[in-house]
Image (cartoon, helix red, strand yellow):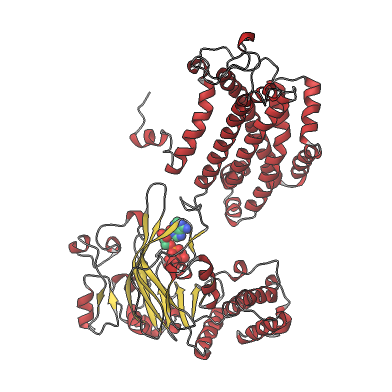
Amino acid sequence: MTALPLAARRSRRLPKLPKRMILPAVLLALLIVTPFAAPLLTPYDPVQISVRDRLAAPSWEHWLGQDEFGRDRLARVLYGGQVSLTVAFVATSIACVIGTLFGLIGAYFRGPFEFVTTRLADVVLCFPPILLALLVVTLFGPGADTLVAVLSILYFPAFARIAFSEALRVSALDFVEASRALGTPSHRIVLKTILPNIAGPVSVQYSLTAAAAITIESGLSFLGLGVVPPAPSWGQMIRGARAFMNQDPLGILIPCVALTLTIYAINFFCDRLRDTLDPKGNAGGKDVTSVPAPGRAPVQEEADVIASVRDLRLELRHPKGAVDVIEDVSLTLRANQCTALVGESGSGKSLTSLAIMGLLPGAIRQADGALHLRRKQGGMVDLGALGPKALEDVRGNDVAMIFQEPMTSLNPIHKVGAQMVEAILSHRKMPRAEARSRAIALLELVGINEAARRFDGYPHEMSGGMRQRVMIAMALTCEPRLLIADEPTTALDVTIQAEIIELLQKLRQDYADGLSLLFISHNLGIVSEIADRVVVMYSGQVVEEGPAQQVLTDPHHPYTRALMESMPSAHADLHSARGDRLQAISGTPPLPDARPSGCSFRDRCPMALPACAEARPPLFASADGSRAARCIRAPEAQEAA
Ligand SMILES: Nc1ncnc2c1ncn2[C@@H]1O[C@H](COP(=O)(O)OP(=O)(O)OP(=O)(O)O)[C@@H](O)[C@H]1O
């Protein structure tokens, strides 16, 4: 036999258990293994009767005392655990496999498959569980095998229903459509694409079912319909101890504690498993979003500064360790100014803007830096010092955001007007009729024709451009001073893009209090039209910033130059900076955990020097302080300018 190459041997090793799974896994393993180690832990036979020692108290020989027949309680709880756990886990596993397959097949193939699988599950669900259990036990007689069969039948519909509804949802998603378009066989789509995506809810159901199965097993044994005496089970123990509860409470307490601990351990394990299986899940975080951290020092900003970000560092919490996704990012957003944040996908634009909104994903944490925002009342507030309630008040009132895809940002089941009125009333106390008039006025402001009629329309009745206008109107409901637009035109066609840009420009001019716009885009052509300042990000860092016209016509960082050379543009002034041919930037940006030493861009930079590998370059500011670039060659370029 040929030896496996090292890589192949490595890949055969069991995957490492994530840190957060260790405690629940150890706890569950302990509770499962302990009953099966009964012969090592106790010398007593669980069915050995000693009438002389009925209800004997705990002693050195019998640590947990003896039951109503003088049998050793420790032996009975351990051996009883073997029966209860085997019945519960075998039955739950059978129900899980059959139910999940039923649900998957029904949801993916639909038609007769859906009819057969869902109806079969519905038939079982028609019977009250205990009645069905009693029926089967009466027909086949009590015993562990019958219990497994009963519990499997009882619980498979719950799995089928969850798997069906989840698989139905996942089947409609684009990546499943894409797999179909690639000609992937159906069984592979079902097992490799859909199944992993429904594993979270199915595992939660597993934990609930296993816990319920232990309880039902105990219940049936308690009624004398489960495990046949004298074989021990926790239900049997409770049944036996019930008559002597007042005299000997320990007898009922011990199996109840064993049951409770086991159910808790199963729930704890499955809960953590669900978080671990979901790659988007909170890697250790408990919230859906993580709140900003308090800033290090109060800032004295000029009066026209609307928001400031200082030395922001965002950390991705990962089971394998924390990784910095944003490093040392500083931004100053001023009234009446449009600041464009540009950079390749993954450079950190969205995370920076979400940090300002206090809406970071749960897996990402603000590890350093400060975020300050000017409130309408005038003063700057440290976003990190605000509680969740105050942050909610800031969002919408002082800062608002519009997203790339207006269809998914608007709630499809509510009328556009109702959504706008809700947004207004959540921040302002006013009669509903007044909120309605305000919403219609806003729709008119953003250029929606027949605003009063559109107010009563649903999002799906509008074009992409109109929906984006509605989103802008919603963002403006409480007249925020800062509007963050995360690629607001990417999903729109070119003519509508131009209209939306024109609208944003007009709003900026008309806004009485001076609107600051943070505009995130890949499109340097649009940026050159709308932005006053440009901030270029690469691999989680700001690499260049300055007045838009200067940065876009005379970039000082090789990455900005490369970005411009790679982008088609109808703008003559941008052409002069790059010549006529489009040139792709070679290579790809490094992942946050694999940035090279020194300058992050050096591996792709045509102008890299050996010194670029030595240390991460600082931002070199130009003599007048209006521009800065994170490149050791920037001072040369700044002098030449
Ligand atoms: N929820 C998340 N969990 C883990 N990593 C994330 C998460 N969100 C973003 N990242 C990582 O953080 C980095 C910055 O992502 P971000 O979304 O801010 O980039 P971007 O410049 O806005 O990209 P795009 O233009 O594609 O939206 C990327 O490496 C990304 O993979």
Q: Is residue 136 visible?
A: yes
* 411 shown above or below 242: below
Q: Nearer the viewer, residue 454 or 425?
A: 425
* Quadrant including the N terminus: top left
In this image, 237 relative to 319: left or right? right
Q: Is residue 556 visible?
A: no
Instruction: Locate residue 316, reporting x and y percent.
Output: 41, 56
Instruction: Locate residue 404, reporting x and y percent.
Output: 54, 70
Residue at 48% x, 60% y is: 361
Determine the image quadrant of residue 497: bottom right
In this image, 254 relative to 342: left or right? right
Instruction: Locate residue 495, reporting x and y percent.
Output: 56, 80
Residue at 61% x, 51% y is: 180
Residue at 59% x, 57% y is: 174
Q: Quadrant of ligand 1?
A: bottom left
Q: Nearer the viewer, residue 359 or 589?
A: 359
Q: Nearer the viewer, residue 303 or 51?
A: 51
Instruction: Locate residue 630, reporting x and y percent.
Output: 27, 70
* Quadrant including the C terminus: bottom left
* 234 shown above or below 300: above
